Image (cartoon, helix red, strand yellow):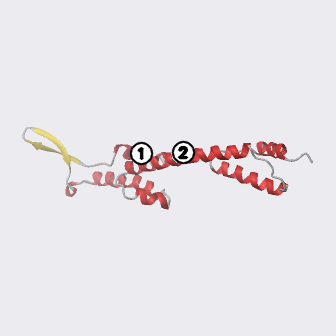
Amino acid sequence: MHDVLMVEDSELWDIVLDGPFVPMIEKKDGEKTRLVPKPRQKYDEADKKKIEKCYKPKTLLVCGTGPDEFNCVSAYKSAKEILDCLKTAHERTEQVKESMIDMLTSLYENFKMRKGETIHEMFINLSSITNELRSLGEPISMSMQVRKVHEILPKS
């Protein structure tokens, strides 16, 4: 996520982390002066451009999600809220991914050719495991796969 925004514009990442730009004006309250949000009708061209730029990170994050995530993130008002939601969802997804990798690695390590199974069938079953590992970011090199096939082939 961060990389997408950084490529687009480093200011966008600042907007995500710091929140959107809100034009402010000084308002005297007796002897004290405080900053308050500027009324829309008093926005100048620079204010309008900064505000427009604030919509971009949210748009990029929302448009970069799949249909399942879209429903979750589209209700949030700020890019920071969207990013936090996606991080939380992704952390859970990462835990599931790690569990899948562990299970598939165990299947790969304990893989054996079944009785009555042809070499072709055995290779398809082994390829299924290695392809799933690859899709999870844990590729098994071709040399390791060849070594595994040599280990499990019957001596005949």
Residue 81 horizontal/vertical position (percent):
37, 49
**Residue at 88% from the left image edge and 47% from the top image edge:** 154
Secondary element under disc 1, as helix, strand or loop, is: helix
Residue indicated by mark 2: 95
Mark number, residue 13: 1
The answer to whether any part of residue 137 appears in the image is no
* Nearer to us in this view, 102 or 71: 102
User: Residue 114 or 98: which is nearer the viewer?
Assistant: 114
Of residue 52 and residue 143, the one placed in the foreground of this image is 143
Percent x, y of residue 129: 70, 51
Can you tell which mark lies on residue 78? none
Looking at the image, which residue sits at the far top? 31
- Where's residue 88, x and y in %? 45, 47
At 77% from the left and 56% from the top, the residue drawn is: 124
Q: Is residue 139 left or right of residue 65?
A: right
User: Residue 59: x, y in percent?
Assistant: 41, 57
Task: Name which residue lies at 43% across and 60% down.
Answer: 71
